[in-house]
Image (cartoon, rainbow, N blue to C red):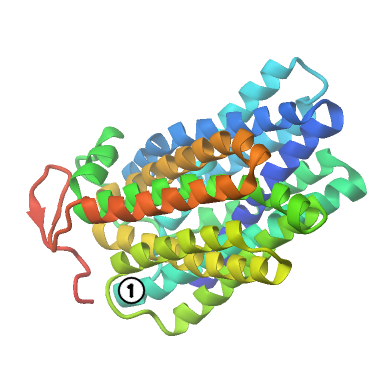
Amino acid sequence: MLSRYLIGATAARSGDESSGPALLLLGLSSSTAVTGSTLLAGLTIAAAFGGPLLGAALDRSRSPGRVLATALAGYAAGLALITVLFGRVPFALVLATAALAGLLNPAVAGGWTAQLPALVPPERLPRASTLDAMTFTAASLAGPGLAGLLANLAGAPVALTVASVFVAAAVPVAWRLPRRAERPRNPRKPTAAALFLLRNRPLRRTTVTTTLSYAGIGMAMVCYPVLGLHRLGGAGYGTLLLTVMAVASLLVNALLARHPLPGPPDITVLLSTVALGSGFLATAAAPNAILLVAAAVLIGFGEGPQLSAVFAVRHREAPADVRAQAFTTAASVKIAGMAAGTAVAGPLAGQSPAVCLCAAAGLQLAAAIGYLVCSPGTGTRDGTGARRPSPARGA
């Protein structure tokens, strides 16, 4: 069952990763770059709000796989509808369609990952979390390149249509995920996840850390095309550095799946954040292509383990009755952080990509400080604030 899960997750996430570039190219093909970025912003901002509601629906259902499948089908249909409507109806209606589709976007990430504990025994969950994180990296490698290739060969509408098909291909896998033995009793309200993330010390710490970190990552992503233009002779060469990062991330997670790091995943969150900051500083200072590639590898070595470690912490700390909400709400907060970083980076990267990268590194430092400031603890708190032992402590 885990192998089918990973195939479905990779398909859904590849479609999601290709949808962003496809939306940008769709806007650029018929209007301006602002049109495409507005569509992507509408989808992304809506995703930040949709996570808690979708998580609550997953936690309350006896068949969360079917809820997940319905959300994925709705997201795929929304992407396909954008393709049909674009250029044929007023842009406001297309933007509203993107926003409605975005409400279901957290199903691709947090909603899917929250189902993993039902597929593997607790002792295999850390390795399964690493494999799950690798599906994100594989999707980030395949998705954007596929979108660009299809847009060049057949046009941006075809690229967005294929993205929706990839998401839809995951629907049958999600539908067949295991059912719960019984319907959850006394289900928590959607606001419970936000309170739980605040009260649970390890989850609060990782959420604060990764939200700040992803804001920095969003800033850095904007810098790479400009960096390629300034130092490598073309914007396209800068985006190739993103591929180097993704390959490094995939390789290090493949290694960690076989040989996990010693110690709890919480420490990996901190160390990987420091690696990201160091990589951004190295990129800002690198004078030639060789050092830029080396810096991209360092960033990949930080980004991959950070994601798998965050998954491991969430699986360990979140009880079953709020797990999906914890995943989707935390994912929504991270999406909002990344969107904020991307918005701030545009003007700054245009003036100086090196300064923008230093600012991104500064956010990684702030994330590391946030990790240290958020009070540590060996115990955790449930949604009411009562102390309870961590479920997988010592496993």
Q: Is residue 332 visible?
A: yes
Taking the view exactly as shown, the residue that stands out farthest to the bottom is 259
- Figure quadrant of residue 136: bottom right
Number of residue marks: 1
Location of the C terminus by quadrant is: bottom left
Q: Nearer the viewer, residue 20 or 157?
A: 20
51 and 242: which is toward the camera = 242
Type of residue at label 1?
Answer: Pro
Q: x%, y% of residue 53?
A: 39, 34
Please report the residue visible at 73 percent of the width from the left and 56 percent of the height from the top: 238
Q: Residue at x 77, y 25 (%)?
A: 85
Describe residue 234's horizontal placement relative to residue 330 as left or right. Answer: right
Quarter of the image where one finds residue 306: bottom left
Q: Please rate how many residues cluster around mark 1, counting C-alpha atoms within 10 Å: few if below 14, some from 14 to 19, many from 20.
A: few
Residue at the location (56% across, 34% down)? 343
Q: Is residue 118 visible?
A: no
Classify mark 1: helix, strand or loop.
Answer: loop
Residue 369: percent from the left, percent from the top?
30, 53
Looking at this view, name the residue that lies furthest to the left.
386
Question: Which residue is painted at 37% across and 42% down in the image?
Answer: 329
Furthest residue to the right?
A: 153
Q: Position of residue 241 (x, y in %)?
A: 68, 61
Residue that badge 1 annotates: 121
> Horizontally, is 389 left or right of 275 in the view?
left
Left or right of residue 306, residue 286 in this image: right
Which of 377/321 is in front? 377
Q: Position of residue 204 (x, y in %)?
A: 26, 49
